[in-house]
Amino acid sequence: MPRPQPVRLYCVPYAGATSSIYRPWQTAHGAAVRVIGIDPPGRGTRSREPRVLDYRELVDSMANHVAVDLAQSWDQVSDLRYATFGHSFGAMLSLAVADAVARAVGRPPERAIVSAALPPALQPPGDETAALTDDELLDKIRADGGTAPELLAHKAMAGYLVRLMREDYAIRRQFHRDDALLVGFPITTLAARQDRYVTPEQMRRWAAHSTAQSRQVEIAGGHFAAFADPANTLLIAHHQLNEHLVRR
């Protein structure tokens, strides 16, 4: 069996978050997967840059960020592989970024992994959070369970998170612009069986966005199951990426 080559796994945050959510993943599983969280401009590691609220401009900016990092990495390891991961809101964004990167650098990713997200055709036409007050939106964030309670208890941080969430939902309303996105590399869907926002059956619809063979992996838990056990999530990613390599 060929020895797995290192893979740079570029991970896009879910709504209202920054790439810091992936820090615990960086030590969760070291077998040939290097987790790299990527932020949109104006947030997290790119907080000094102007914010971008147009979907296509955002995709281009994040793709350029990844392409530059890959070019520098290939100077050191010419056969280094890469892949993408996106959860919930970050799933659609990560797939579009992967497509743009593949065209920019002339090398497709090994695979795009999308987790806990409706494909574009099933996205709701409106924004259920638009009519919510800030307090009501905070209640929703708490109920979803993707944000540490201590952050929500801090008034200034809670206000910051509400702003990020509203910005991301404004982007999500533009996902329909990529309804016809069709990539030439494989997609793996990661579906949580008890997810109240998206069912495993709905997750299978992502396969329509790739001309390559796509696969689905199901795990136990709710919407943030992938973050409840990062080691298991990365083990799945590792298996998917290296099984694809062996079958070439």
Image (cartoon, rainbow, N blue to C red):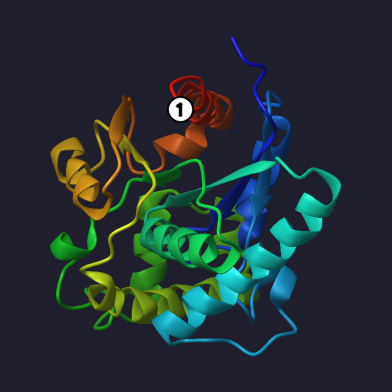
Q: Nearer the viewer, residue 10 or 194?
A: 10
Q: Residue at x 64, y 90 (%)?
A: 50
Circle 1 packing at 10 Å, graded few (<14), some (14-19), many (20+), is few
Q: Quadrant of the C terminus?
A: top left
Q: Is residue 15 above or below residue 216?
A: below
Regarding residue 198, the answer to whether it shows in the image is: no
Q: Position of residue 182 (x, y in %)?
A: 28, 60
Name, please, the residue furthest toward the top.
1
Q: Quadrant of the N terminus?
A: top right
The secondary element bearing badge 1 is classed as helix
Q: Residue at x 36, y 82 (%)?
A: 170
Q: Position of residue 161 (x, y in %)?
A: 53, 71
Name, please, the residue furthest toward the bottom.
50
Q: Answer with left or right where residue 45 lies relative to residue 98.
A: right
Q: Nearer the viewer, residue 145 or 205?
A: 205
Name, please, the residue furthest toward the right.
76
Q: Position of residue 12 (x, y in %)?
A: 53, 57
Q: Answer with left or right where residue 226 lies relative to residue 68.
A: left
Residue type highlighted by circle 1: His
Q: Residue at x 67, y 55 (%)?
A: 20
Q: Which residue is mark 1?
A: 244
Q: Answer with left or right where residue 202 lies relative to residue 246.
A: left
Q: Is residue 1 above or below residue 189?
A: above
Regarding residue 52, the answer to whether it shows in the image is: yes
Q: How many marks?
A: 1
Q: Nearer the viewer, residue 124 or 241?
A: 241
Q: Position of residue 82 (x, y in %)?
A: 60, 45
Q: Residue at x 33, y 25 (%)?
A: 220
Q: Quadrant of residue 18?
A: bottom right
